[in-house]
Amino acid sequence: MKKVLVLCTGNSCRSQMAEVILNHDLAGTVQAWSAGTNPQPKVAEGAIEALRLAGLPVEGLHPKTIETVLNQDFDLVVTVCDNAREACPVFPRRVNSIHVPFHDPHGEPLASFVAVRDDIRNRLVQAVRAALQTGVPA
């Protein structure tokens, strides 16, 4: 099973939704984690509700700092916001990475979270699958 890290700034919305979606849609082939370069205190309610509306699990979701996962042997790191891309840390070993940015719906109505959830599902799942198959350069 391939290990994928989804990295964002606050780890409270986009990266959390991406973690859940990747673990669901690529179950059996990918194990995804998420973390933030500057994590928020909690996962955004809009993100949790958007996942629930799609029938996806939300138990145990909580923001995590990048330091808690730095020593994992990831096969792929995905940045989903420009700030995380710029602040992406150096991992102890070489790891391939891709950047797939998404709109930040924080402070917006639930419909924005649902739109971002669907965008993640439509674009990120395919991008991760392709990156793992082709072995994109780091």
Image (cartoon, rainbow, N blue to C red):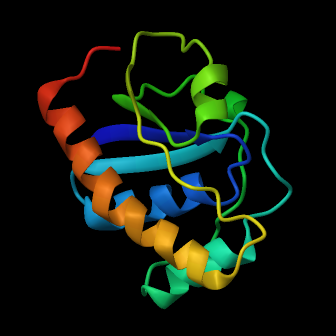
Name the residue located 47 percent from the left edge and 39 percent from the top edge: 5
Query: Where 3 sits versus 122, above or below?
Result: above
Query: Where 11 sits versus 114, above or below?
Result: above
Residue 105 at x, y percent in the picture? 65, 65
Query: Where 90 sits versus 96, above or below?
Result: above
Total numbered circles: 0
Give residue 8's quadrant in the image.
top right
Residue 134 at x, y percent in the picture? 13, 28
Name the residue located 37 percent from the left edge and 49 percent from the top edge: 31
Viewer can see residue 58 = no
Q: Nearer the viewer, residue 31 or 113?
A: 113
Viewer can see residue 90 = yes
Outermost residue toward the left? 133
Name the residue located 36 percent from the left edge and 38 percent from the top edge: 3
Query: Where 57 sits versus 2, above or below?
Result: below
Give residue 129's quadrant in the image.
top left
Relative horizontal placement of residue 80, taking residue 41 as reference (left or right): left
Quarter of the image with the N terminus is: top left
Quarter of the image with the C terminus is: top left
Relative horizontal placement of residue 66, taking residue 122 as reference (left or right): right
Q: Nearer the viewer, residue 124 or 52?
A: 124
Give residue 133's quadrant in the image.
top left
Residue 12 at x, y percent in the picture? 70, 57
Q: Nearer the viewer, residue 110 or 128?
A: 110
Relative horizontal placement of residue 12, taking residue 90 as reference (left or right): right
Residue 39 at x, y percent in the picture? 78, 45
